[in-house]
Image (cartoon, rainbow, N blue to C red):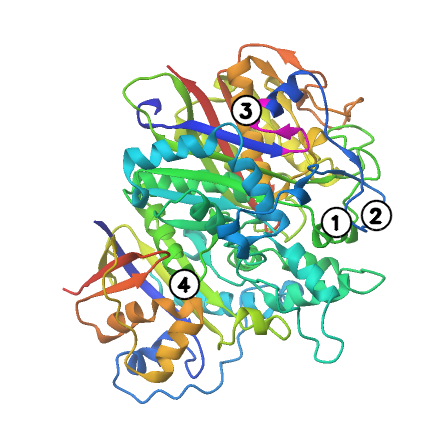
Amino acid sequence: MAADALIISACTLVNALGRGAQACFDALEQSRGGLRPCDFGDADIDTWIGRVDGLEDEPVVAGLSSFDCRNNQLAQLALGQDTFAERVAEVRGRYGAARVGVFVGTSTSGVLQTELAYRHRDPVSGALPADFSYFGTQNAMSPAEFTRQFLSLEGPVMSVSTACSSSAKVFASAYRHIKAGLCDAAVVGGVDSLCFSTLYGFNSLGLVSDRPCRPWDAERSGMNIGEGAGFAVLEKRVGDAPGVALLGYGESSDAYHMSSPHPEGAGAAAAMASALTMAGLTADAVGYINLHGTGTRANDASEDRAVMQVFGSGTACTATKGWTGHTLGAAGVTEILFALGSIERDFIPGTMNSEHLDPALSADVLLQNRSAPVSCVLSNSFGFGGSNCSLLLGAVS
Amino acid sequence: MNFFHVDALGLAGPGMASWQDSIAVLAGKGTYRSGDCPRCTSTLLPANERRRVPASARMALQVAEEAMARSTLDIDSVCSVFATCHGDAEIIDKICVALAEPERSVSPTQFHNSVHNAAAGYWAIAAHSPMPSTTVSAYHASFVAGLMEAVAQLRVEARPVLLVAYDYPAPEPLAASVGAYLPFAVAMVLTPDATPQSTRLALETVSHQPVEGMHCGELERLRVSNPAASGLPLLRVLATGASGRVLLPHVNGLQLAVNVEME
């Protein structure tokens, strides 16, 4: 498998932990979490959030002003870190702009702009303000097209919008497009930013916690919403150069309920098993699992059963949403890049905030950071609509 | 070249109740009268879910069910790719109206229906299908992006894929920004290998070549206004039953060239 695996040759991240992938890995290694009591706009919800400071002061570049909104500001901030844009320029030079695809996951795109526009409807006609730019902001394609134009790429472009699995599934889509010869390399990523729809929506479902979220904890009481952006370059490996590769992916549908996970975790287990099968690996090859781990009672219980079915209790697990909040459509890329940092730096991040593991759950969840060589990580992302995706990342040498 | 096969289709649009019902007008053999869009429904969803499914997803499910009913494949054996530019603007409108009120009481059902993959989620429930599903979006090229994703998937993973493209109109005040168009949805069962009833197609990317629209004015208006209808030229060739080549615009000058190869 590793012979024709695609490698991640560049990456970047921005979330509540910091600006840039290296800054985020530093925060993980030094146990600095990113959650704070909710201070987003005039939201009046008793919860904690993972907000990115100073986003409001970073308007998108002049040539792309029709895309200006919090979500694309976050995308742009990420594209400007870790010399990512420069690395993409090299990739563009190598393959040609038309041979580099763009695959971006998002759940709510720039819907905050629409929410704010509805507050300023014309009192007589009900019309939205004249400067409202639907296609540049709320439309699901907005972050993908913004990214494509920002990076001057001309290959196949699409957004993938499958709720909280969106930016895990972009890796699978990009892999398929490259293998089918529709492009030679791809920029993959995910962007989701704080907005009122998700804060009030998840609150209406009784899923947000009034405390920092505590995945797998006996007292866990829900999730925290965060925002984040992450991007990576996926391309063919040159010769047998060492690197970190996408070894496999697995996707499935719950076919059970729109917003509740399958109680036995059937779909989640199928996704994890498919990723292993594609990579030609068995469970014991996986150093640890980055759980979807939102901290809601039902999600963690369902995922725990799925992990037991595929891995048993012998594989270390961590859940990183206590560090960043649940960045929704950006969670997949955020967590697979945490896995990449883990492989590069030989450590496994612990499950921040969680103190007393739920005795009803069986997975071997790490509470504290652990120093250990890591060569292979499985990362889970599950979303509304029963959309499941597991990614398998590993060192190749 | 990526080769693939079309095993079955489903369709719903203004004046077009099904794929069978649309073949003559798409092939230019009958007079097309736009008119009303059929009332769409899912016959496979359990009643409790059917009550909650939003209008856009109802349309997607109807064409998916029609295509699978005509298909030689089992309904729970195909992967799915859903393509929609606008998702469900009626739901976004209701949530934004609620958020502009002092109480900000968002309905939990509307919230879970607001995800772009709502139709895909309901489809999995309706079809009892654990198979992978994705939902893509690419402005007016959403059908093209969906077709590319579906073909890449069936080529690389060697299994059949159900492609469903749909876009349902937005209400005011969003419609002023989204644009006005009539509802349209199409489903195609695509396979890597021939089936007893399939047509062979081939696909490649090209760029900056002249694109041909629909000859009928009303169908052309539908093609340029509703992103799900941007594949109408391909459907026209399939309806004629003859070989042909169509160019479908993607984004920024890129195009998808699709050859239909009748025996």
Which secondary structure, mark 3?
helix
Disc 2 marks which amino acid?
Answer: Ile
Say above or below: A210 vs A160.
above
Q: Nearer the viewer, mark 3 or mark 4?
A: 3
- Residue at point 71% right, 60% down? A116
Disc 3 residue crowd, few under 14, some 14–19, many 20+, Cα 10 Å = many
Residue wearing tag 3: A339
Which residue is labeled 1 in the image? Answer: A199
Residue flagged by tag 1: what amino acid is it?
A: Leu
The picture places residue A211, in percent across and down from the top left corner, at 83, 35
Report the amino acid beneath label 4: Met
Q: Are marks 1 and 2 in contact (CB under 8 Å)?
A: yes
Q: Quadrant of the C terminus of chain A?
A: top left
Disc 1 and disc 4: Cα gap in Å?
38 Å
Spatial CA span between label 1 and label 2: 8 Å
> Which range of residues does the magenta coloring cover?
A15-22
Given the image, what chain letter belongs to the residue carrying mark 2? A
Element at label 1:
helix
Q: Residue A54's image quarter?
A: top right
Dot 2 alpha-carbon crowd within 10 angstroms: few under 14, some 14 to 19, many 20 or more: some
Residue named by callout 2: A45
Instruction: Quadrant for residue B146, please give it.
Output: bottom left
Kind of element beneath mark 4: helix
Which residue shows up at 80% across the image and 50% down it? Answer: A43
Is B31 situated above or below B261?
below
Near-viewer residue (A33 or A71): A71
